[in-house]
Image (cartoon, rainbow, N blue to C red):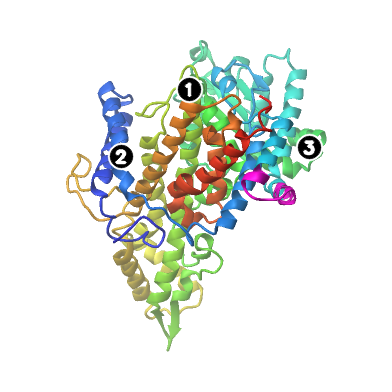
Amino acid sequence: MTVLNRAELFSRELPAGSARPSAIIARLDVLTREQKANGTSTPEAQTEARALYDELLHQSAPLRQDDRAPSLGTQEELRARFIEAVLLWMSFCQTSSLPLIDSLDTRSIRAFPIDLPPDDAAFALLKRALVASQGSSEQEIADAQERVARLTPTLPLKRALTQALQARLSAAHAHPARFADLMRECYGELPWHASDVDFVLTATGIFFVLPIDGDRLLVPDWARRAEAEREAIGGFLARLARENLTETWRFPAFGLFDAERLSPELVAELGRQVGASPESVRQALVTMISILPKGEIDQYLVHDAWGHTWQEVLNDFELEYLLLRRVSDPLSPSDGPTFGGSATPPFTRAFQAHAGTTRLDEQRLLGTADADLRGRIHVGSSQVLSEILADFVEAKFSRLASSPLPTSSLLAAHTLKYDLSIQDALRQARRWSRPYRNLWSKPEERARWVRALSAEGLPEPGLGEAVDRAAALLEASYAEVLRPAIAHGSPTPASPSPSSASSVVTRILLELALLCGELERVLDETAQARPTPAWTRPTCCPDLWAVGLSHLYEADRENRLWCLDTLVRTSLREACDALGRELDKPGYGSAPG
């Protein structure tokens, strides 16, 4: 019987019991796309979506399985990773902050409830409880602390840069165009007026805030500005809209940015102030600068400033985001190692000269394709997971704050935005499958392979036939499961001919539904039983769950993608419970607030 795991990623059948959950996912997809097409959602669509999400969590629960070794790893490794995760959690409070500068007096960023504020006394108690609850020694904690310090090298530099920027801008406080001038230093010369640009600065984030209205600014004097000014800014805003989702190489920053336009004078000045090389400063700044729409500032700021920044400075999601930029590039004979790993031979090795002709080694071709595709799929899935974890931190805010954050999701603000996760997963499925789909469907792509292989010295006789055979074999092996569509058993307007066959993206979404069910349980507990201070009950600290789950995931990404719900339900919960029980014992009662 097929199950949700790495080994059966390309299975042509969904696990038993998947029909109704898959149909729910497909319906949520339809509702979300209808909302996007209409530009707004109706109360009826919201009500239906929320009921469907609740049903999905219930209907998908039977699909879960408590994975154990070897897919989860050894108990010793899980224990060591949890200790490191708690130590990383102690740095979570430094990955963002109350605004250092905020020209908008933004409500949301000021109200974010940190589970573990910076407090050396609290950190000392947690370390002591770690020793007892995990059966470790003080030396093990000290060794783990050293490992954690090596994992977070960008955090001190980013904090130093924002402090230097704060001082620089505070010195120019009386200058009304100081934020517009800084934006020109970061994005190049454009005719910004002083009133166009607002600004939010946190411990690691630099946010320019613009009153965007399509390709114009929503300012009173827009129509009176010179045509050349309006054209220059309109062109910039159009590029910003196009590249907002595609430019992910700067994670945790997003969207349009041209590093070549970053002012050398600004870079040199900041480098002198923080004692870092210009190149180090430049590399840090390009991952810190973002543009947010003024009218939706509360919808995005917490999500970016508290949901994503820690994923780079405490974890390594930026590695996948860097590769994500290349995931949909045309497939080439030299591909294989980039996404499949250094041990994966390039596709070129599957084409061999024999007696003056080129022949195809089908086994080698499929071996490289398997590794390459798994790597591409993993990169795309990491992006979806990154967004889910940011939504999880954001949902904590909405559960605990007096008023929830605004959202474009059809689901309630205090839940995970699974409807948006569906769109993320489908978008990435289109991207990582496109190189293969183009190869077997477009003659010009196969002709490009023939030219590239010929340039490698392979004989012309048989070469075209070998490439055609390779494309046909890849299509026969993968076309069905690589469909960027949800496999389900119920017809919809978008899919009048339903299919019960599997697709990779459907399997991923089923696994993520299981994860969402476990994370919703954490959010429920947080809202119902959160003490003061929150860190004294780790099970009610979503920040720890997010950092801990990410740290465990990164130890074995491709296997643990399929064990995320198990990790939350078993290893992480057991470790959090043990830590909490230790903190409840006499001797910890004087814990600071």
Relative image position of residue 545 (x, y in whole percent): 53, 39
Q: Position of residue 155 (x, y in %)?
A: 69, 39
> Which circle's residue, 1 or 2, is located before the other in the chain?
2
Label placed on residue 58: 2
Amino acid at circle 1: Glu
Q: Indicate the amino acid at tag 2.
A: His
Q: Residues within 10 Å of mark 3 (few under 14, many from 20)?
A: many
On-image quarter of the N terminus? bottom left
Decide which of tag 3 and tag 1 comes sooner along the chain.
Answer: 3
Give the labeled residue for mark 3: 271
Up the image or down, 137 lies above or below 57; here it is below
Q: Name the side, left or right, on which 562 lies relative to 485.
A: right
- Mark 3 and mark 1 residues within 8 Å of each other at the beta carbon: no
Up/down of 46 relative to 440, above or below: above
Q: Residue furthest bottom?
A: 355
Magenta-colored segment: predominant secondary structure: helix
